[in-house]
């Protein structure tokens, strides 16, 4: 049940627009919580992951359409195999990010509920409530596998291009009267197509690299969030400090009057 709630909560809605997340950010800000800035930074980095993944999915869609137009069956087979592997890894990254978002939303909901019962004391350990380290690591691992898939795709295209042009060289050595200008043109065209798809796979790789950078920054923000909560003054100390500030003037020593009476 909890997994289903997390998946539903972390669906297509941007994490920064989620009601639970916004409510907790407001609560942290209103109570001047030491973890407010760190939590906001964490959400910013997760939002960055969302944008990178959205761009990666758009690029994959464009790549799929271009693959349908490839005439050479051998090259098409190489591209289809590589594209499918990359698509599976990007989808795994998407699933891990959805789980991360769902866990953030669920953690925010729990903190807000705890705040209703215990007040500001509930804000002391929000990093413990969130428990995001495994989810962030899962996103990072999925992004690394996506990078590996992109690298393998580029290597396959390079290998295909080398074999294709080597075959073309041998054919030309058999005599231009058999192959003629058509074979030479075909070789150049496949070279252009291969370079175009290599570029697309490299773009996908760059998206995954940015996701990893975001996960590392989010992990750093999460660590600082935990340390900020540890430095938070106790509720009792905060109450005493507030009481001292608001102490009625009549209860304080009337130093000026005493001095004048001497």
Image (cartoon, helix red, strand yellow):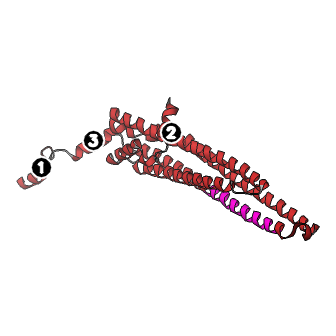
Res. 147 mark: none
Q: Indicate the quadrant where residue 31 lies.
A: top left
Q: Is residue 72 left or right of residue 48?
A: right
View extreme (top): residue = 1
> Viewer-nearest of labels 3 and 1?
3
Calculate the distance from the C-alpha at mark 3 to the C-alpha at mark 1: 22 Å
Res. 240 mark: 3
Residue positioned 83% across, 66% down in the render: 183
The answer to whether residue 137 is visible is: no
Neighbour class for label 2 at 10 Å: few (<14), some, many (≥20)?
some
Res. 131 mark: 2
Q: Is residue 15 left or right of residue 253?
A: right
Q: Is residue 150 left or right of residue 39?
A: right
Magenta residue check for 30: no
Q: Indicate the quadrant where residue 105 lies.
A: top left
First in sequence: mark 3 vs mark 1: 3
Q: Position of residue 130 (x, y in %)?
A: 47, 39
The answer to whether residue 239 is visible is: yes
Res. 254 mark: 1
Residue positioned 79% across, 65% down in the render: 186
Q: Are marks 3 and 1 in contact (CB under 8 Å)?
A: no
Task: Give the secondary structure at mark 1.
Answer: loop
**Magenta residues, start to end:** 184-206
> Viewer-nearest of labels 1 and 2?
2
Q: Is residue 158 left or right of residue 2?
A: right
> Viewer-nearest of labels 3 and 2?
2
């Amino acid at each position: 049940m909890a997994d289903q709630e997390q998946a539903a909560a972390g669906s297509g809605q941007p994490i920064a627009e989620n009601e639970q997340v916004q409510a907790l950010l407001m609560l942290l800000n209103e109570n001047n919580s030491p973890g407010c800035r760190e939590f906001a930074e964490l959400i910013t980095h997760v939002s960055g992951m969302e944008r990178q993944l959205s761009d990666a999915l758009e690029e994959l869609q464009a790549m799929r359409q271009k693959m349908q137009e490839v005439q050479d069956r051998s090259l098409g087979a190489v591209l289809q195999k590589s594209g499918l592997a990359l698509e599976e890894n990007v989808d795994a990254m998407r699933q891990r990010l959805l789980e991360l978002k769902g866990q953030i939303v669920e953690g925010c909901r729990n903190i807000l509920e705890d705040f209703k019962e215990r007040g500001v004391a509930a804000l002391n350990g929000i990093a413990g409530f969130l428990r995001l380290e495994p989810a962030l690591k899962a996103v990072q691992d999925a992004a690394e596998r996506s990078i590996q898939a992109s690298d393998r795709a580029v290597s396959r295209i390079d290998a295909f291009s080398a074999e294709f042009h080597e075959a073309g060289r041998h054919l030309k050595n058999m005599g231009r009267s058999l192959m003629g200008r058509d074979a030479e043109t075909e070789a150049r065209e496949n070279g252009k197509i291969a370079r175009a798809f290599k570029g697309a796979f490299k773009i996908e790789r760059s998206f995954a690299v940015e996701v990893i950078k975001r996960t590392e920054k989010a992990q750093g923000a999460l660590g600082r969030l935990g340390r900020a909560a540890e430095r938070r003054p106790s509720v009792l100390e905060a109450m005493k400090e507030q009481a001292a500030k608001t102490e009625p003037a009549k209860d304080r020593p009337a130093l000026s009057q005493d001095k004048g009476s001497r």
